[in-house]
Amino acid sequence: MEINLQIEKAKKGDQVAFTFLLDYYWNEVYGFMLKRTENETNAEDITIETFSKAFDKIALYNPEFQFNTWLIAIAKNVHIDLLRKKKTSLFIEITDDEDQQAYNIADTTPSAEDELITEQNLSQLLQFIKELKPHYQEVIQLRYFQEMSYQEIANKIDEPLSNVKIKLLRAKKLLAEIIQDKR
């Protein structure tokens, strides 16, 4: 089956397969979260983070279950984390345990990664950025140095908006890890 083939390719790191899965399941996950949250921004943020987490952990996916069931389970957990985070605290701490990491990925609210990135002096920051893969360097450059919106970046690099958001999520996470490691 086409989906299983794409999942296997994605497990091997195939970017085209990731994009296929994202495009194929985006509306289902987004629609599910929109019903639950009744808020377009929250639904989109949760969906972006769901795919980010799913792609990070795709090696752990068990093919005995439907892929969409797995994605929905991740989305529910992301939503619960978001609600818990809103209740407990506005400050997000970067921890070593990936599963405990919560990202506030709304366009306007700076995340812990954003704060960590902006704390760095410019020459140091540029050195850290050079350690990222070129496609991550590019989105960081466009977002933080040319101050482009997600949509402007999507247009510039000719990629879907959802990919840009997930790329920026990954880039910020990796950059924050580099900064943490160098401290």
Image: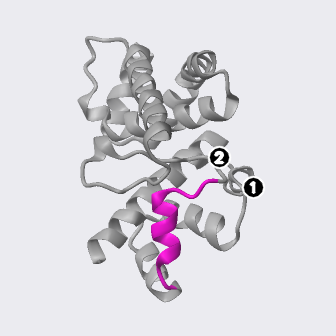
Relative image position of residue 89 (x, y in whole percent): 45, 47
Residue 160 in view, yes or no: no
Colour convention of the picture:
one colour
Q: State which quarter of the image contains the C terminus.
A: bottom left
Vertical comparison of 168 with 115: above or below: above
Q: Within 10 angstroms of label 2, few (less than 14), some, or many (20 or more) residues? A: few
Specify whether 141 is left or right of 15: right
Identity, as a three-letter code, of the amino acid under mark 2: Glu
Residue sitting nearer the eye, 27 or 156:
27
Residue 42 figure quarter: top right
Specify whether 97 is left or right of 19: left
Q: Which residue is mark 2?
A: 159
Residue 162 figure quarter: top right
Instruction: Report the magenta residues as a range.
Output: 109-121
Residue 96 in view, yes or no: yes
Q: Earlier in the sequence, mark 1 or mark 2?
A: 1
Farthest residue to the front: give it: 88
Identity, as a three-letter code, of the amino acid under mark 1: Glu
Relative image position of residue 129 (x, y in whole percent): 46, 73
Do residues under tags 1 and 2 come within 8 Å of each other at their CB atoms? no
Tell me what residue is drawn at x 35 percent, y 47 percent.
101
Farthest residue to the bottom: give it: 123
Tell me what residue is drawn at x 53 percent, y 85 percent.
122
Q: CA distance from mark 1 to mark 2?
A: 10 Å
Q: Is residue 110 magenta?
A: yes
Vertical comparison of 105 with 70: above or below: below
What SS does tag 1 mark? helix
From the image, give the main secondary structure of the stretch colored magenta. helix
Nearest-to-viewer mark from 1 and 2:
1
Tell me what residue is drawn at x 44 percent, y 16 percent.
68
Q: Is residue 120 magenta?
A: yes
Q: Which residue is mark 1?
A: 152
